Amino acid sequence: MADAKKDQTPKLRIKLKSYDIKMLESSVWKVISLLIKSWAKVKWPIPLPKKRKLYTVLKSNFKHKSSREQFERMTYSRLIDVVETWSKTVEYLQNLSIPVGVLVDVKVF
């Protein structure tokens, strides 16, 4: 019977994305400390591959096609799996304040 209760608890998958690695890491540790505080069983943050987006822009609007500038944007992401949750876990996650530059995606399965 105890195994049936464990199967009924919702599992969470939290994915955090950001362009700034320092902001992302601080947000990840905020979420981890909050989950540990709520007695949830957590799989530590899994670093996902970073995505690199490259933009090429002409320096001149008409002439000199060979002179170009390139800009890149790196997207960093981390994945946190919450294996077992309690009633306080979701309540704590709703009250969490995360900086504006970090995208948080929570899926329940």
Image (spheres, rainbow, N blue to C red):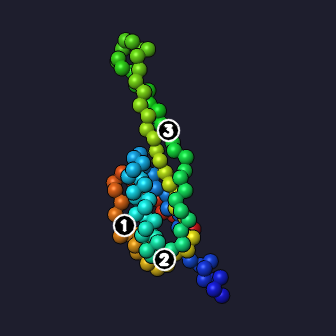
Most extreme residue toward the top is 63
Separation (CA) of disc 2 from disc 1: 16 Å
The picture places residue 59, in percent across and down from the top left corner, at: 36, 20
Question: What amino acid type is highlighted by mark number 3?
Answer: Arg
| Residue appearing at x 48%, y 76% in the figure | 39
Density class for disc 2 (Cα within 10 Å; few <14, some 14-19, many ≥20) is: some
Residue 56 falls in image quadrant: top left
| Residue appearing at x 62%, y 77% in the figure | 7
> Is residue 108 at least partly visible in the picture?
no
Question: In terms of sequence position, does the residue under pointer 2 or pointer 1 come before the other?
Answer: 2
> Is residue 63 at least partly visible in the picture?
yes
Separation (CA) of disc 1 from disc 3: 29 Å
The picture places residue 105, in percent across and down from the top left corner, at: 47, 59
| Residue appearing at x 46%, y 65% in the figure | 32
The picture places residue 27, in percent across and down from the top left corner, at: 40, 58
Residue at numbered disc 1: 96
Please say if the residues under marks 2 and 1 sit with CB atoms less than 8 Å apart. no
Density class for disc 3 (Cα within 10 Å; few <14, some 14-19, many ≥20) is: few
Residue at numbered disc 2: 39
Residue 64 falls in image quadrant: top left
Question: In terms of sequence position, does the residue under pointer 2 or pointer 3 come before the other?
Answer: 2
Question: What amino acid type is highlighted by mark number 2?
Answer: Trp
Please give left or right for residue 83 compared with residue 1 in the image: left
Residue nearest the observer in this picture, 103 or 36? 36
Separation (CA) of disc 2 from disc 3: 36 Å
Secondary structure at numbered mark 3: strand
